Image (cartoon, grey):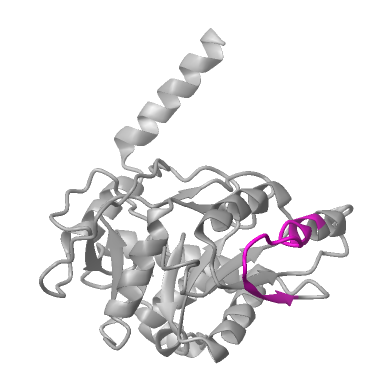
Amino acid sequence: MEGNGYKIPVVLIIFNRPALVKKQFEILERVRPEKLYLIADGARENIAGEKSKVDAARAVFAGISWNCDVTRIYADRNMGCDRRIVSGLNEVFDGEEMAVILEDDCLPNLSFFEYCRKLLLQYQNNTEVMYISGTKWVPKYKMPYSYGFSYNTGTWGWATWSRAWQEWHWDRQEWEERKWDWLKGVYTKKYRKSWIRDMEKYFKTDSIPWDYVWRFCVGKRLSIFPAVNLIENIGFGEDATHTRVNMDGYEAEVSDLGEIRMPPAIEADMQYPLAIEKQYANPIYRRMWKKIMRIYHSYHF
């Protein structure tokens, strides 16, 4: 890192999973960010025992051993995951030009931080680039440089600038008018339809997923993805908000990025979204294979 500590502000979003927060603490203890923002929602009153878990998660960062300016953005009452994240990031970017953002279940490889630092500074004033993702959704996808530019690259471990985040907004009418043009030419119509369906299922519960809205606001502007996967999502399970079951096709293994080799030009990789679609659209052969394996295990175990 730079000198005695990491110079870019780091944001960690936590809630009620202290075991995951401890893993993040161990990583950040090695990175030693000089500025740390902790965003936390309040406990839900109707969930027995949740307040003690929320308190335990917050207590993990009670004793920071390195020189660090800590800002705790804690809600007294439950706001809901999506509202809490958006309001928390609004507060962060009211005072910061850029930041690295992690949720409690997005565990980074250490090289993620240098990757974010370099690219945040490199593209700070380039409005073509909206954010930097630490996740490579298709690990076997071959790339000539340390990162590439594409669309909808994801927010499991990411970084952005205040000039980009200020564009986050939600307008239902705008959604209805633009949803079929969203990612048109990036994914097939069938896959885009699944994105729209996933988004609109939240409307029935009066929930607006912040990350879907963010990607909608970004639209067809560019984001960056790494040549190797830098983020492991360790949060799948019943206590998760959105990732209660393992995502079909997701491979969590992470690697060290090594020396960063920059591409010579800012050009959108149009093949990467198609590779994502192929891996995650759950083609029939994958569904059949999973069914065969379930039958196999039911007879042999």
Residue 86 in view: yes
The one of 298 and 22 positioned closer to us in this rendering: 22
- Above or below, 13 against 16 in this view is below
| Residue 66 position within the rendered picture, expressed as x and y whole percent measured from the top left | 62, 63
Residue farthest top in this picture: 300
Q: Nearer the viewer, residue 188 or 19?
A: 19
Rendered position, 163 above or below 188: below
Residue 231, percent across and down?
A: 43, 52
Which quadrant holds residue 83? bottom right
Q: Position of residue 67 (x, y in %)?
A: 62, 69
The magenta stretch is 56-74
The residue shown at (69%, 46%) is 19
Residue 98 included in the magenta stretch of the image: no
Report if residue 281 is visible in the image. no
- Is 156 rendered above or below residue 76? above
In this rendering, is residue 246 above or below 57? above
